[in-house]
Each structure stands twice: as C-alpha cells, then as structure tokens.
Image (spheres, grey):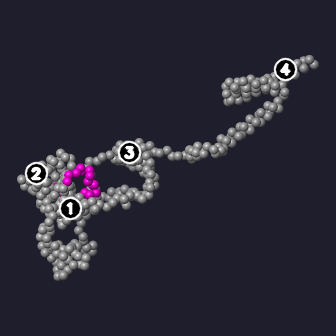
Amino acid sequence: MKPTQKVLNVRSIWNGAISFGLVSIPIKLVNATESHSVAFRQIHTEDGGRIRYRKVCELEEKEVTQAEIGKGYEDADGTIIPITEEDLASLPIPTAKTIEIVAFIPAERIDPLQMDAAYYLVANGVPAAKPYTLLREALKRSQRVAIAKFALRGRERLGMLRVVGDAIAMHGLLWPDEIRAAEDAAPTTHVTVRDAELDLADALMDTLGEVDLDTLHDDYRDAVEELIASKISGAPLEHVPVAEERAGKVIDLMAALENSVRAAQAARGEGEAEVTPLPARRAGQRKQAAGRSAPGAPKEVGGKKSTATATKKAATGKKTAAKKASPTRSTATKSTASASSAAKKSAAGAKSGAKAKAGAGARGGASGGASAKKTASRRRTSA
C-alpha cells in the first residue's frame, strides 16, 4: 500500500526508547494508519443546530476546561479515587517509557486475531540511527519478529516489531486472554461436503483470482461524498440501480456455485465458464441400483415392451397349432426339414436354429402343397 502522508509530518503520540538487551534506541511512536471516513456532526433535526457535549462538573454544575480535568478510579461503592500523572510515572515498571524486547519468534506464530493498532518507530535524533539500523538488519537476516512490552494510554500492552521497507513498524497485540474462542462461531450441525462441491469452489476461487490491493478503494465513501456534493450544488444525484438483495438461504448449493463461476468469468470478460454440472440420477438408475442391491428379489415385468412380447408369443403359439393341423404328408416333410434344422441349431446356436426352423417349416408346407397338386392331376388323367 502506498502511504498518503509522510511520516515526518505526523505528530508523535509517545516518546521513549527501544530496549534491545543493553542497547537503547531513542524513538518516537507515530500512527502508521489514518482514517478517511466521512465525519458527520450531530444536529437538531428541527432547525439544523449543532448538538454539542460540554464537560460539566456535577458538583459545581459548571463547564470546566481540559486543563482542569484529571483521572480518577471509581470504587465499587461509588467513591472516586484520584490518580495523577505523577502517580503513574512512579510505577516500578520498565515499560513506562521503554519498548522492552522480550523475545524473537517466527512471524507465522502470531495469530492475526491478536493484531491491533499499527505504529511506526521513528529514530529520534542522529545517535539513534546506528542502533536503529542494527536492529532492522538483524530482524531482516533472522526473518523473525520481535515481541515487546510497552505502556501506552494507562495500560501495559504487547507489541510485535517487524521491518517494513527501511523502517521498523510495531503492531499492538491483544493479550492471549483477550481473544475469544472460535468454537461457538462454527456450525453445530454435521455437514458433509462432496468433492464435486469442493471442485466448484476451487474453480470459483481460481476465477476470482488475485488482486492488487492498491486498486481497492472505499466505494461507500465515494457515494457519500457524491451525495454531499449534490446537496451543496443543488444538482440532482444520479441514481444507480442497486443490485437485487441476495437471499440468505442457499436452496441449491451446486447451482449457486456454478452461477457464481459464470458471473465471475463474465465480470472479468473471460466469456462463459466451463462448468461441468453433476448428472441428475434418474428413476430408472435408482431402480436398477435397487435391483442389484437385492439379487434374490424376482425381476419385475411390466410396461409396453413386456406386453408386446407377450402378444408376440401368443401369435407364435397360434401359428404352431395351425401347422400341427396340416395334412399328414406335409407334416412328414416338415418333420424332415425340422430334423435338418435341429442339426443346424447345434452348430449355429439357439437363435439361428430358431430362425432356420421357422424357414424350414415354411418350405415344407410349400413342398407338401405342390406334391398334393401333382397327385390330383395324375388321377384325373387316368380317369
């Protein structure tokens, strides 16, 4: 991130020294961050008058100046115990005016949840340049961060010193007992995530990709500043259509992930995303799976195909009965052909034999009919 204001122009909030063993480094503590939020004032809605808070002494019922205000601790019974700056300065702790380094550890051991405010440590004076540079280079070469304790705004704090560019920065750290446990934030119901869902989530992450943090900015602040500018100029504010509010409940997680990938692809101008949806399981597949899981169950017969097969078998039975009722000579010829067909059946298989048998029966019927006609013709000639 590019700094927007030079550190040397920022007012220091604390002056002291870094204690690095027996080495003392005079420094000034300055804020490393700044807020760009739009500040609003409280007003009286009826006439627009400013609402102000005044510091009033409740005993004298009169306003007091900042110079007249001190610190006090309220006891359990309501008694106020005054605490002066001299009382705080006399506390027997070395961190009152010193950032005391207590250890050096790898940066990955710091939980980001502990991160608090960030400061720059500025070398205070020419004599501080050499030990300051020594500490900075030692941190660079060791690839570790320094853990320190310091006192600021009435309490002792924990800090982490690390190198940022050519400077040393210090992050205030929360004490470990100030971090709440994360168990209560996790879902209490047991959920199983499929590999296909993880694959889609990975595809969405790859599509969104990385980002240059310097390109991100506060869109809400820009919109508020445009609103204020339109109020000052009297010009109407151009209304931009707001995207539809997304429902908090996900009905179809897979569909939502697929649509998210496509939307991310479209936003980046990469065209349609290649998303492979999960195939829907059909009812027939479920029945087959059920049949395989219970091999002892009888196969269910039904449907149009089974009805057509039954009709075909009935017709075949009628044709067979009709052939049995044919003349004796025709039947003998048919039997001879059937014997020949049976030999072919043993060589070619059941299906081919059945076809051969049907064909032979048809030829036998035709041959028998021709022999009967010749016999009748000879009888007529003899007569």
| 373 vs 324: above or below | above
Q: Residue at x 14, y 66 (%)?
A: 92
Look at the image and say whether residue 191 sits in the magenta stretch. Answer: no
Specify the segment rendered in magenta.
103-120
Q: Quadrant of residue 98?
A: bottom left
Task: Please state which amino acid type lies under the numbered disc 3.
Answer: Ala
Does residue 40 show up? Answer: yes
Near-viewer residue (363 or 7): 7
Earlier in the chain: of badge 1 and badge 2, it is 2
Q: Residue at x 68, y 40 (%)?
A: 308
Near-viewer residue (361 or 176): 176
Q: Mark 4: which secondary structure?
A: helix
Q: Which residue is mark 4?
A: 374
Residue 131, label in figure: 2
Q: Mark 1: which secondary structure?
A: strand
Task: Please state which amino acid type lies under the numbered disc 1.
Answer: Arg
Q: Which residue is mark 3?
A: 203
Label 4 or label 1, whichever lies nearer to me, is: 1
At label 2, counting other C-alpha atoms closer than 10 Å, the crowd grade (few under 14, some 14-19, many 20 or more) is some
Look at the image and say whether residue 112 sits in the magenta stretch. Answer: yes
Q: CA distance from mark 3 to mark 1?
A: 43 Å
Q: CA distance from mark 3 to mark 4?
A: 86 Å
Q: CA distance from mark 4 to mark 2?
A: 134 Å
Task: Please state which amino acid type lies under the numbered disc 2.
Answer: Pro
Q: Mark 2: which secondary structure?
A: helix
Disc 1 vs disc 2: Cβ atoms closer than 8 Å? no
Disc 4 vs disc 1: Cβ atoms closer than 8 Å? no
Near-viewer residue (124 or 272): 124
Residue 157, label in figure: 1
